[in-house]
Image: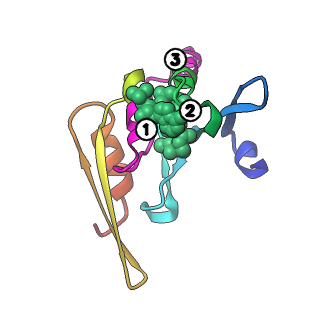
Amino acid sequence: MRRLRSEGHQLWIVDGRSGVGFVCWVFRTRAPVAAAKGRWIDLPDSVVCVEDSLTAPAMRGRGIAPGAWCALADRLEADGVQALVTKVEHWNRPSHRALAKTGFRPTAEMKLDRAWGRSRVAATPLGGGTGALLAGLILGGREG
Ligand SMILES: CC(C)(COP(=O)(O)OP(=O)(O)OC[C@H]1O[C@@H](n2cnc3c(N)ncnc32)[C@H](O)[C@@H]1OP(=O)(O)O)[C@@H](O)C(=O)NCCC(=O)NCCS
């Protein structure tokens, strides 16, 4: 955590009165992507990556994550940020539901196959937004 914060990444917390209600990391200038070469991608200043979003189990289903992402977007827009991106796995229905409430939309699909210690990644833009940029950054430097 100290290392990430010293690099300028930020941990955002929603105070849930009786404890932490929600947390997420905000990555600027570069973001962790396990499938990318070096496991990180460089981001332009106008794009910020939100990762590791987590609502306290007892507080789920109350719109806390969507509210937090919207508040974050308002703050970051004032800094010139034009897009928030986040990764979500296909099976994660609660996350898809929460993201859809805030105006997030799918811009790229990533597939990672691991076998015999080797990994193969595919990244496909879904049209518009940051999809082409992200797919290019994820595939950059890899054989495909
Ligand atoms: C994804 C997550 C951050 C959403 O947070 P949230 O503050 O509960 O968001 P919402 O209140 O908008 O709820 C989203 C969906 O969660 C589901 N949900 C509702 N109540 C729930 C509960 N008590 N427990 C679990 N899921 C619940 C519903 O499908 C809901 O969608 P709906 O409101 O359209 O019915 C939260 O479920 C979570 O921390 N999950 C584990 C970590 C994770 O998967 N992080 C996301 C990584 S991309």
Horizontal and vertical percent for residue 27?
58, 40
Q: Nearer the viewer, residue 11 or 101?
A: 101
Point out which mark residue 94 bears.
1
143 up-or-down from 13: above or below: below
- Residue 97: say if magenta: yes
Q: Secondary structure at mark 3?
A: helix
Q: Earlier in the sequence, mark 2 or mark 1?
A: 2
Q: Nearer the viewer, residue 138 or 53?
A: 53
> Position of 113 compared to 15: left or right?
left
Residue that carries the numbered disc 2 in the rendered image = 60
Q: Secondary structure at mark 2?
A: loop
- Bounds of the magenta span? 71-98
Determine crowd level at label 3: few under 14, some 14-19, many 20+ residues with C-alpha closer than 10 A: some
Horizontal and vertical percent for residue 3?
75, 51
Q: Earlier in the sequence, mark 1 or mark 3?
A: 3
> Which of pointers 1 and 3 indicates the residue nearer the eye?
1
Q: In the image, what residue occupies the spot 29% across and 44% down?
A: 108
Q: In the displayed orientation, state which residue is furthest to the front.
A: 58
- Residue 79: say if magenta: yes
Regarding residue 3, the answer to whether it shows in the image is yes
The colour scheme used here is: rainbow
- Amino acid type of the residue that numbered disc 1 sits on in the rendered structure: Pro
Residue that carries the numbered disc 3 in the rendered image = 77
Q: Is mark 1 within 8 Å of ligand 1?
A: yes
122 up-or-down from 8: above or below: below
Residue 9, image quadrant: top right
How far apart are the alpha carbons under marks 3 and 2?
26 Å
Mark 2 and 1 residues: CB-CB less than 8 Å, in contact?
yes
